[in-house]
Image: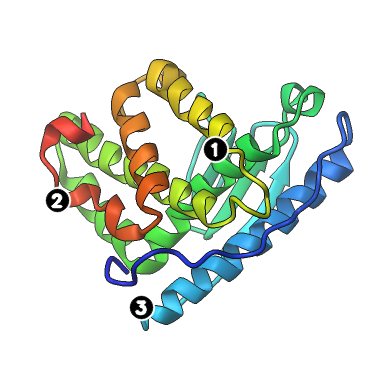
Amino acid sequence: MYKTGTLARSNCAPGEIQRGSTAAYKHFLQAFTNCLNRAWAAEFKQARMPFSKPRLRIITTKRNTACGRWLTGASGVYCSSDRTMYMLITKTELRNPSPVGIGRLMAHEYAHHVQQVAGIMPWYGQVHWRASKAGKLAYSRRLELQAECLSAVFMKSVKDTLPVDEAYYQQIIDWFGEKGASIWPQNDHGSSRNQARWMQRGWDYGAAAACNTWNVSAKYVS
C-alpha cells in the first residue's frame, strides 16, 4: 500500500447537511462512506491486495460496541471485531454541522478499517496485548496518528468536489495542533503537535507512503 503513490482524486459530493436535520446528517454519512469505499477499494486494487467494505452504524447515543465500552472523547469509533464504523450524531453537530469536519472524522475511522484490511490492525492487536502499559500507549499513538494521516490523504483526494477549502482545513489542523491531545484522557492519540504534524503530512503528500508511523523515531509519535 505504501508503494501505490498518490491516492487518486475522486468525485465525492455527499451534499449539504441541513441544520437540525438528523435525516440529512444520516444521508451525508452514508454518501460519504460510499466515497470512502470507492477510493480505498481502488487503492487496494492498485496494490493488488484484497479489500472488503466496513459496515456503517449510525447512532444518536453513546453505547458499547463489539469492542467494548464507548471511548471517552470519541464522536466516532471503528471496531475491528465486527468491522463496523459507529458514527455518533451529536446535538452540537446538529446545531452547526460541518461537512468537512465530519468528513475528516469519518475518514479517520475508515482509516482504521484500512489498517484492519491491510493487516496492520491484526498485528497491532497482538503486540499491544503483550506490551507494558507504556508500550500499549506507544503502539496506540502510532496506530492513531497513522489513521489521522490517512484521513488527510483521503480529504486531499476529494478536495475539489466535497469541496474542501484549503484555508479552512488548515484551521482544523491548527486546532488539533493546539488542542488535539486535550480530547483524550490519556496520551494514546499523540501530542497535539504530532497530531497536527501527521495531518499535515497526509494533506501535503496525499499518499499512504507519507503515513508510515511504524518506522519513525519515538519523538514523532509521542
Q: Is residue 147 left or right of residue 134?
A: right
Q: Amino acid at mark 3?
A: Ala
Image marks 2 and 1: residues in contact by CB distance under 8 Å: no
Q: In which quadrant of the rendered image does the N terminus lie?
A: bottom left
Residue under numbered circle 1:
166
Image marks 3 and 2: residues in contact by CB distance under 8 Å: no
Residue under numbered circle 2:
215
Of the residues under marks 3 and 2, which one precedes in the sequence?
3
Image coordinates of residue 131 in percent, x first then y, are 15, 41
Q: Classify mark 3: residues with Cα within 10 Å, few (<14), some (14-19) or many (20+).
A: some
Determine which of the numbered discs, if any, sits on residue 47 in the image.
Answer: 3
Asked whether 39 or 63 is in front, the reply is 39
Q: Amino acid at mark 1?
A: Glu
Q: Is residue 16 left or right of residue 76?
A: right
What separation in Å lies between label 3 and label 2 (alpha carbons)? 20 Å
Name which residue lies at 37% across and 83% down: 48
Image coordinates of residue 191 in percent, x first then y, are 30, 24
**Callout 2: helix, strand or loop?**
helix
Image coordinates of residue 93 in percent, x first then y, are 73, 27
Determine which of the numbered discs, if any, sits on residue 218 in the image.
Answer: none
Q: In which quadrant of the rendered image does the C terminus lie?
A: top left
Of the residues under marks 2 and 1, which one precedes in the sequence?
1
Q: Is residue 145 above or below residue 159?
A: above
Report which quarter residue 23 is drawn in: top right
What separation in Å lies between label 2 and label 1 (alpha carbons)? 29 Å
**Callout 3: helix, strand or loop?**
loop
Image coordinates of residue 86 in percent, x first then y, are 62, 46
